[in-house]
Amino acid sequence: MSNDQALNYSNYLKVDELLSLQQPLSDGPEHDELLFIIIHQTYELWFKELIHEFAASQVALESADTHRALSILGRIRTILKICVAQIDILETMTPLQFNSFRSRLGESSGFQSAQFREVEAILGRRDKRAAAHLLPKDRDRVERWMASSSLWDSVLRYVNKRGYQIPNSILNRDVTKSYEPNPDVQDVLIELHRKDLEAGLVFERLVDIDEGLQEWRYRHVKMVERTIGRKSGTGGSAGADYLRQTLFTPIFPDLWEIRNRF
């Protein structure tokens, strides 16, 4: 920015550039295509923020900074609530309105969102097939997260630093592989909940996030069913049938397993 151009709301936020990014392709264009574009661009912005916050939460947890971890995890939970609420807006578009421009989407699909795949990888997904269809630069980003410690790995280090011993075989596990629920870890988590109420709040925030992501997945499935039924999704994805497979799979299974033991 030149010295003679004062900083203001518009140029700080790049408003002109931002508003130029919505470019409908349908003839007319169809009224509802602008809503569709804005909703999905907004999701990508929230995914960017989630990646930023999850990375910060890992630093806070591995530093055993409980207060900062609670603040960041609470923010993540609230962002997920906003992501769910946006589906209410998208559902104001009827199937006929969506189909008025759907053919213009070509091979594009939400299935191709690299940033959401990054979020999944941070949360522990270790299935390289999830990134196989992405562009090389995007696939590399996702695979880097899959080769790094997940949020749950950072949580286990946090527990260990609070004085509750996590088995070394778990702390030093191969982070490129999916985490499997572990009874020894669950025993430690039960003890922590009973003796360390402050740390217990961190785990309630994690359950909030787990529940929030499951809620988003459920609402996403129902929105797709409501809009296109059981038809294949754009880009050749399986549509609602694929999305339904992701339902009711917890991110932090140990935190759900211990509910049976309180």
Image (cartoon, grey):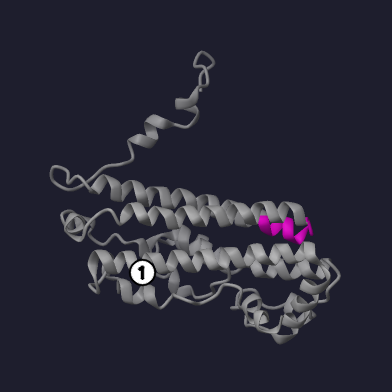
Q: Position of residue 149 (x, y in %)?
A: 65, 67
SS class of the residue under badge 1? helix
Q: Is residue 102 magenta?
A: no
Left or right for 241, reference 200 = left
Left or right for 254, reference 247 = right
Q: Position of residue 95 (x, y in %)?
A: 20, 60
Point 23% across, 48% down: residue:
32
- Labels in figure, total: 1
Which segment is the magenta one?
A: 57-65
Q: Position of residue 116 (x, y in %)?
A: 46, 61
The residue that disc 1 covers is 221
Task: Name which residue type carries label 1.
Answer: Val
Front residue of 214 and 241: 214
Residue 113 falls in which quadrant of the image?
bottom left
Within 10 angstroms of label 1, few (less than 14), some, or many (20 or more) residues?
Answer: many
Quarter of the image containing the C terminus? bottom right
Front residue of 79 and 126: 79
Front residue of 17 and 72: 72
Q: Is residue 61 magenta?
A: yes
Answer whether residue 125 is visible to the viewer in this image.
Answer: yes
